[in-house]
């Protein structure tokens, strides 16, 4: 039940953040990123998603299961391309 609640909360947060991400990351992309993170037991503040010049995404301050913190990069198709511990 916790993962379902997390995804619901993440989706709501993503929709709430639409206005602040209008210039950079659209709401659909934020929702896909949050869903990906939930699938790998991670979470983050949507404000820390940055659009890269190549169309990919830089995710700052991602907290994963066990409390580990990472910076994660995704390509334009939302595939993880890198993970660096902070």
Image (tube, rainbow, N blue to C red):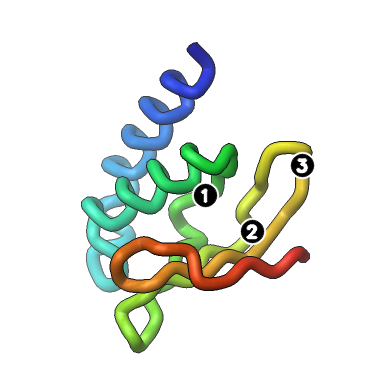
Q: Quickly name the residue at label 3.
A: 67
The numbered disc on residue 45 is 1
Residue at x 50% of width, y 71% of height:
81
Question: 10 Å neighbourhood of mark 3: few (<14), some, or many (≥20)?
Answer: few
Q: CA distance from mark 1 to mark 3?
A: 15 Å
- Of the two numbered discs 1 and 3 in the rendering, the one whose residue sits closer to the viewer: 3
Q: Is residue 11 left or right of residue 65?
A: left
Q: Earlier in the sequence, mark 2 or mark 1?
A: 1
Q: Quadrant of residue 57?
A: bottom left
Q: Position of residue 13 (x, y in %)?
A: 38, 38
Above or below residue 23? Residue 30 is above
Q: Secondary structure at mark 1?
A: loop
Q: CA distance from mark 2 to mark 1?
A: 8 Å
Residue at x 28% of width, y 57% of height:
29
Residue at x 23% of width, y 64% of height:
22
Above or below residue 82? Residue 20 is above
Q: Is residue 57 left or right of residue 84?
A: left
The numbered disc on residue 61 is 2
Quadrant, the C terminus:
bottom right
Q: Secondary structure at mark 3?
A: loop
Q: CA distance from mark 2 to mark 3?
A: 11 Å
Q: Secondary structure at mark 2?
A: strand
């Amino acid at each position: 039940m916790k993962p379902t609640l997390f995804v619901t909360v993440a989706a709501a947060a993503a929709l709430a953040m639409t206005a602040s991400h209008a210039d950079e990351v659209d709401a659909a992309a934020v929702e896909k990123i949050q869903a990906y993170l939930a699938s790998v037991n991670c979470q983050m503040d949507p404000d820390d998603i940055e659009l890269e010049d190549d169309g990919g995404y830089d995710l700052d301050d991602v907290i994963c299961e066990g409390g580990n913190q990472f910076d994660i990069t995704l390509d334009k198709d939302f595939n993880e391309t890198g993970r660096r511990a902070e």
